[in-house]
Image (tube, rainbow, N blue to C red):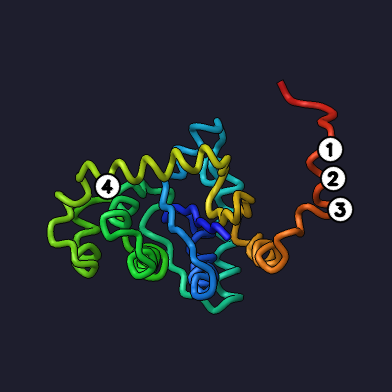
Amino acid sequence: MDARWYFDFISPFAYLQWPKVRALAERQAIAWRPLLFAGLLDHLEHKGPAEIPAKRLFTYRHVTWLARQRGVALRFPPAHPFNPLLALRLCVAANSTPTAIGAIFDWIWGQGRAADSLEAIAPLAATLGIADPAQALSDAAVKTTLRQNFDEAVAAQVFGVPTLSLDGQLFWGDDAFDFATAFLADPGLLSQAPFHDLTQLPIGSARR
């Protein structure tokens, strides 16, 4: 089965889902696809959760509660939302390996460190074997790969992060992980009633 995980380090829900997806990768090959969530929001003309004041506070409280429930270390970075572009480029420069992904998530959400400037991210880059982050993060090939990930996500109709794509079926959000693994266990699941019937449900009203 073709499996791809679309994520952005800006998302605390991606951080919470990461251990589960990493464990899944031990039995199911997964292609890692870091991408700029803000680009998806612009493309879809959506607001992000942190752009709606009440939703922002709820989201922060929710992820804090979830982390406590799961026994996962969570410390917010100095500011949120932040610009994750350098963290995403660092991930690509480190070949988007599970080791790199885990290290960047831990830096931002496990240790609560900034990752939005070269100075802030340089020690992390060094641990990933990147001695000259300024050169690596401005490399044309790195930028191209990140853009390709974004274009691939748009073509696949990805609308949020984290999203686990399984043979083109999208499972969005940390709370959809069990749904995704159920589909993995039974690839015919969405072809059965009532799931398949939902594709034919008419739209009764639409906002202008």
Q: Amino acid at mark 1?
A: Leu
Pointers 1 and 2 in contact (CB under 8 A)?
yes
Q: Alpha carbon of mark 2 to alpha carbon of mark 4: how far?
A: 42 Å
Circle 1/circle 4 CB separation < 8 Å: no
Q: Amino acid at mark 3?
A: Ala
Q: Tell me which numbered mark, 2 or 4, is placed earlier along the sequence.
A: 4
User: What residue is drawn where x is 38% and y is 53%?
Assistant: 79
Q: Earlier in the sequence, mark 4 or mark 3?
A: 4
> Between disc 1 and disc 4, whose residue precedes?
4
| Neighbours of disc 3 within 10 Å: few (<14), some (14-19), many (20+) | few
Q: Amino acid at mark 2?
A: Asp
Give the residue displayed 22% in from the left and 41% down from the top: 140
Read off the residue under disc 1. 201
Instruction: Please say if the residues under marks 3 and 2 sit with CB atoms less than 8 Å apart.
Output: yes
Q: CA distance from mark 4 to mark 3?
A: 43 Å
Residue 50 at x, y percent in the picture = 52, 46
C-alpha span from label 3 to label 1:
13 Å
Question: Total marks drawn?
Answer: 4
Are the residues tagged 4 and 3 within 8 Å (C-beta)? no
100 relative position to 64: left or right: left
Residue found at x 30% / y 41%: 144
* Position of the N terminus by quadrant: bottom right
The tag on residue 49 is: none
- From the image, state whether disc 1 or disc 2 is nearer to you: 2
Disc 1/disc 2 C-alpha distance (Å): 7 Å
Q: To which quarter of the image does residue 77 belong?
A: bottom left
Percent x, y for residue 121?
A: 24, 58
In this view of the protein, which residue sits in the foreground, 139 or 65? 139
Q: Which residue is mark 4?
A: 142
Residue sitting nearer the eye, 101 or 77:
101
Rounded to the nearest angstrom, the CA distance separating label 1 from label 4 is 42 Å
Question: Can you give x and y, in whole percent of width and height, for residue 60 in the image?
Answer: 54, 58
